[in-house]
Image: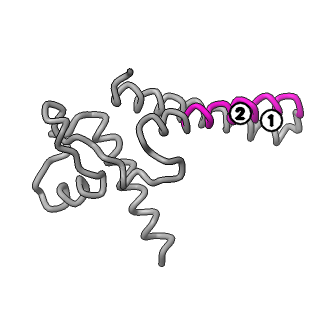
């Protein structure tokens, strides 16, 4: 089985590809190109399915926020995990530093910070 880091990198790659495909789809919609619209829509659906499958492998339900995802702060101690929400709190309190986290965890923490910010923005 692939490592969690490899799976997360694959998800990031697929999300990046989906973003590019979405821009091409928007352009095709502006131009009214029906064939391109169908093609890009199908490719987006396939990408979404692959991402959902990989999320399932990681134990994350589609639609579940990043904040509740468990991460290992120290790759040498993978048995000690915390949620992204807890990692953000530890960063705020100064108990850990962003540079001390593995790169894949840093990316998740950044996504979690954006998610928390957006949640606050839409809750008021």
In space, the residues marked 1 and 2 are separated at their CA atoms by 6 Å
Q: How is the image coloured?
A: one colour
- The residue singled out by tag 2 in the image is 24
Q: Give coordinates of residue 40: x percent, y percent.
A: 75, 31
Q: Nearer the viewer, residue 63 or 57?
A: 57
Q: Give coordinates of residue 3: x percent, y percent.
A: 34, 25
The answer to if 38 sits in the magenta stretch is: yes
Q: Quadrant of residue 79?
A: top left
Q: Residue furthest bottom?
A: 124
- The residue singled out by tag 1 in the image is 28
The answer to if 25 sits in the magenta stretch is: no
Residue at the (19%, 42%) spot, across then down = 73
Rendered view: 122 above or below 71: below
Q: Residue furthest top?
A: 1
Residue at the (48%, 78%) spot, across then down = 124
In the image: residue 45, left or right of residue 13: right
Q: Give coordinates of residue 67: x percent, y percent.
A: 37, 55
Secondary structure, mark 1, is: helix
Rendered view: 43 above or below 66: above
Residue at the (28%, 40%) spot, across then down = 105
The part of the chain drawn in magenta is 34-51
Q: Which mark is residue 38?
A: none
In the image: residue 56, left or right of residue 112: right
| Majority secondary structure of magenta residues | helix
Q: Give coordinates of residue 115: x percent, y percent.
A: 43, 57
Q: Nearer the viewer, residue 81 or 20?
A: 81
Secondary structure, mark 2, is: helix
In the image: residue 75, left or right of residue 103: left
Q: Are marks 1 and 2 in contact (CB under 8 Å)?
A: yes
């Amino acid at each position: 089985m692939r490592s969690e880091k490899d799976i997360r990198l694959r998800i990031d790659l697929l999300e990046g590809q989906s973003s590019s495909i979405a821009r091409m789809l928007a352009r095709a919609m502006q131009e009214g190109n029906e064939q391109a619209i169908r093609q890009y829509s199908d490719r987006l659906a396939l990408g979404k399915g692959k991402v959902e499958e990989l999320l399932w492998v990681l134990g994350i339900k589609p639609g579940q926020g990043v904040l509740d995802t468990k991460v290992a702060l120290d790759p040498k101690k993978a048995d000690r995990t915390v949620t992204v929400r807890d990692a953000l709190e530890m960063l705020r309190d100064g108990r850990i530093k962003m540079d001390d986290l593995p790169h894949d965890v840093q990316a998740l923490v950044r996504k979690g910070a954006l998610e928390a910010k957006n949640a606050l923005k839409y809750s008021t």
